[in-house]
Amino acid sequence: MTEAGNPDRSGRRQPASYLFVPGNRPDRVAKAAASGADSIIIDLEDAVGPDDKEAARAAAADWFRQGGGGVLRINGADTPWFTPDLAALAAYPAAVVMVPKASVAALNDVSRRLPGRPLIALVESVEGLMQLHDLAAAPGLCRIAFGNLDFGLDARIPGTGASLDPVRLQIAIASRHAGLPPPVDGVTVDLEDMGALAADVARARDLGFTAKLCLHPRQVAAVNCGFAPTEAEIDRARRIVAAVRAAKGGVVQLDGRMIDRPVVERARAVLDAAGEGP
């Protein structure tokens, strides 16, 4: 897995692409990890049928036991597989836990059983949205991801793209208020239409997201590229920062425009994301 992504306020690089891989397909896990995705998500939930849950859990444990990294999406708190999933995770502190159908109660339960473990909350229900600000403050939470497909189903909203942008904006604002890294957008189900994927990434980026869930390795490169600063953005950011330095505390102008603090801070964020921070 790469070191690409966006830095949080501590300077750590946050993944821009998260690639799902079924937990019951251990042959695909290493391939997923080598796909260029910033992080993989070994899925014990939706991608695994009831008869394969135990085998998937054992295969995931083997991956982490052998030094593999990534995220493990466990089964929901209302399922019989929840407790065995957490019991297996206790031996592998390097595994980040993705909590599906996230609620405050579910996150607190996971945090109590796995103290100090980094958690990703997958907001994919109306209940989770209604608890969003309390959820964002839950112990151990390191990021929020949007489960757009399940959310649309639960909310009885047919669309899962732009029609859910008001929900995305709430998630971005709640993440910022809680001091979390920017959130992770949900999946694009069309695996062939790269134009649709690029449009989804661009729209999510405009709403404050800096990462996306991927269903297939072919989506990874477009997601990484879409969330990375463009050459034009990097060039302008360099010029803004250089103008600030040259002004030595005085009024800053560039291309006939006044440059105020928010513009400067945004330029520095662009350079940080490009790996050119101080």
Image: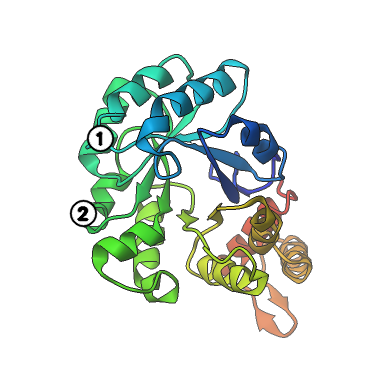
Q: Which circle's residue, 2 or 1, is located before the other in the chain?
A: 1
The reply, left or right, for residue 29 in relation to residue 36 is left
Residue at x 59% of width, y 28% of height:
69
Residue 10 drawn above or below residue 161? above
Disc 2 residue crowd, few under 14, some 14–19, many 20+, Cα 10 Å: some
Tally the marks: 2
Asked if residue 115 shows in the view, the reply is no
Residue type, mark 1 in image: Thr
252 above or below 46?
A: below
Q: Is mark 1 on a helix, strand or loop?
A: loop
SS under mark 2: helix
Q: Mark 2 points at which residue?
A: 127
Instruction: Tell me: residue 45, above or below residue 126.
Output: above
Decide which of 213, 174 is in the foreground and name it.
213
Point out residue 129 in the picture as x, y percentages from the top left corner.
26, 57
Crowd tier of the residue under label 1, counting other residues whose Cα lies within 10 Å: few below 14, some 14–19, many 20 or above: few
- Amino acid type at circle 2 is Glu
Asked if residue 152 lies left or right of residue 11, the reply is left
Q: Indicate the quadrant containing the N terminus: top left, top right, bottom left or bottom right.
A: top right
The answer to the question of whether label 2 and label 1 lie on touching residues, with beta carbons closer than 8 A, is no
Residue ID at (48%, 18%):
92
- Quarter of the view holding residue 38: top right
Residue 253 vs residue 11, the one in the foreground: 11
In-image side of 163 versus 232 (left or right): left
Q: Where is residue 157 in the image (x, y as percent from the top left)?
A: 30, 72
> Horizontal and vertical percent for residue 134?
24, 47
Q: Which mark is residue 79?
A: 1
Residue displayed at 27% across by 52% down? 133
Q: Position of residue 56 (x, y in %)?
A: 47, 28
